[in-house]
Amino acid sequence: MINGKSVLAIIPARGGSKGVPGKNILELGGKPLVAWSIEAGKRSKYIDRLILSSDDAKIVSVAKKWGCEVPFLRPAELAQDKTPGIAPVLHAMETLNEKYDYVVLLQPTSPFRTVMDIDGCIELCCENDSPCCVSVAETSENPYWMFTVAEDHRMIPMMRTEKEVYQRQLLAKSFILNGAVYVAETEYLALNKTFLTDDTMAFKMSRENSLDIDSKMDFSYAEFLLGNL
């Protein structure tokens, strides 16, 4: 709990990954990918209950071995390629008998997210009375330096500053969602059905902790990083 309010954490891990088949239970650093999020979530000083939402029996079995509760099996229609990421969170909130003040989404594809990142995001959300907070990382490339290319091959700036200032040191820092931690008041999330609103706060994470595994190259890079720590 935090400030007397209860916290539910959900790890969504479906079985049908096309980019990296069986991704969520592939071993990374001697343990299944999903175990990294389970361990970090269990170490949180604020999370009251940590559950897994999955449609896959193998993932469920692995999660249970690593001490994660699996109170239900996610319906197949909520585990498709085009299923919105918010769907399993809303389903879990509706399915559980118990009600919680806050819900935390921990995607299993962020193995280097730490318990400090999780608790820091929860703290930022609660201490500022914000209805939601998400983790972000600073981008290596600034959108002010990005272009679209027209059919006649002309470069068209995607963004312009008011004074057309392009000196790198004068540009505002830009951040991107890293997919590691999402926090929201449950009632607010049930109403808005998204973590991203005008009220959302940003919790800044390091680039090192922000790796999101979505491809075989990402997985190989994660193994490389672990081998060079």
Image (cartoon, rainbow, N blue to C red):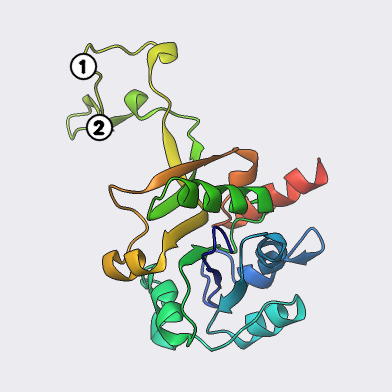
Is 152 positioned to the left or the right of 105 in the image? left
Residue toward you, 65 or 188: 188
Kind of element beneath mark 1 = loop
- Measured as percent of width and height from the top left, residue 31 is found at 78, 66
- Where does the image place residue 45, in percent across and percent down from the top left? 67, 59
Res 60 quadrant in image:
bottom right
Let me know if residue 95 appears in the view: yes
- Which mark identifies residue 162? 1
Q: Amino acid at mark 2?
A: Val
Image quarter of residue 106:
bottom right
Q: Nearer the viewer, mark 1 or mark 2?
A: 1
Residue at image x 37%, y 55%?
131
Q: Which residue is mark 2?
A: 149
Q: Is residue 121 above or below residue 28?
A: above
Amino acid type assigned to the residue bearing label 1 in the image = Glu
* In this view, 212 is above or below 53: above
Is residue 112 at least partly visible in the picture?
A: no
Q: Position of residue 117 (x, y in %)?
A: 61, 48
